[in-house]
Amino acid sequence: MIYTLALNPAIDRTMWVEEMDFHESTRVQKECRYPGGKGIDVSRVLTGLGVPNVAMGFAGGFIGEELECRLSYEGVETDMVRVSSETRTNIIVNETSNGRHLLLTASGPIIDPYELGALYRKLEGLPDATMIAIGGSLPRGVHPDAYRRIVTMMKRKGAVTILDADGLNLKAGIQGRPDYIKPNRREMSELVGRKLKSVDEIVQAAEEVRAKGVSTVLVSIGADGMIAVSGSKRYLTTPPRVEAVNSVGLGDSAVAGFMYGLHTGLDLKGCLIHATAAGTATALKHGTARANKEDVMEMVPRIKFKDLSEGEE
């Protein structure tokens, strides 16, 4: 079974306004609520792609119940650890007049030690884990080392591990030697301690990270696509130019597209193409809605592929 893990999931309260006015009241034209958080979004896209999976993490209070119910409504199976503090709510404001987005991210609940222990026991007890995506921010009270421990635990169980985090969380998780990591350009720059501009610079940085025990490094570079460095392979995929209406959750969709490729037996090239297609397809969805299988498959043939190690397309 495929699992996703979001230690700090959320409800994304998404609103559309014509334009923000910081001196007068701003009228909301439309409002929606979506389940959110890195692992949650990965599960939503995987489900849309027809891949059975289970979303795991912490859920607390009325918002935690809403999170689980909304996931169930979308057909996503969940196995959450119930906690005493309330699950967070993020605020996303979209300006229809200019296409700008404002994201207000809440810090999340305080997790007690026994609640974290309950999550560890649940993960240890999984009998059938074949693949797991781990990522996102950590709730208050949880040390970044939790990511190292979780990656190590799941690898010991034989699961393919995919880590999508940033900052200290990413650095800690890498110590567990995950099979895949998927930072974006900024996160990769922070990881190696220098600004990365060119594709060659990103590839070199990925080599340095691989030397720490990560099998494959995937780096999303926005509208320029994605880079994969694995063994002797250096790949670049580039999406078509599109009129994006959403900038939230594109990386999560890319992770889901990559996992779809792994699940269906595609090679690294195929996985990277599907990852890029999924991220691009979600960019065309309003709010924090996510791409479905039809959206992704329509985008796949439009993705350009280049083998950087050979300089050939």
Image (cartoon, grey):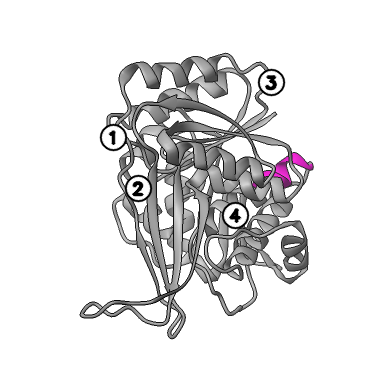
Q: Position of residue 274 (x, y in %)?
A: 70, 56
Give 120 or 263, whichever is nearer the viewer.
Answer: 120
Instruction: Give me the C-alpha separation between circle 3 and circle 4.
Output: 24 Å
Question: In which image quadrant can residue 161 be found?
Answer: top right
Residue 128, numbered label: 3
* Residues at circles 3 and 4 in contact by the CB criterion of under 8 Å: no
Question: Most prominent secondary structure in the magenta stretch?
Answer: helix
Residue wearing tag 4: 254
Magenta span contains residue 263: yes
* Residues at circles 2 and 3 in contact by the CB criterion of under 8 Å: no
Q: Earlier in the sequence, mark 3 or mark 4?
A: 3
* Residues at circles 1 and 4 in contact by the CB criterion of under 8 Å: no
Residue wearing tag 2: 191
Sort mark 2 into few (<14), some (14-19) or many (20+) by Cα contacts within 10 Å.
some
Residue wearing tag 1: 140
Note whether residue 187 is visible: yes
Work out whether 112 lies above or below 24: above
Q: Amino acid at mark 1?
A: Arg
Instruction: Give me the C-alpha separation between circle 4 and circle 2.
Output: 20 Å
Q: Amino acid at mark 2?
A: Leu
Q: Residue at x 44, y 17 (%)?
A: 118
Q: Amino acid at mark 3?
A: Asp
Q: Disc 2 vs disc 3: which is toward the camera?
A: 3
Q: Position of residue 84 (x, y in %)?
A: 36, 26
Q: What secondary structure is found at the residue carrying circle 1?
A: loop
Tell me the quadrant of the picture where the N terminus can be found. top right
Q: What secondary structure is found at the residue carrying circle 3?
A: loop
Instruction: Give me the C-alpha separation between circle 2 and circle 3.
Output: 32 Å
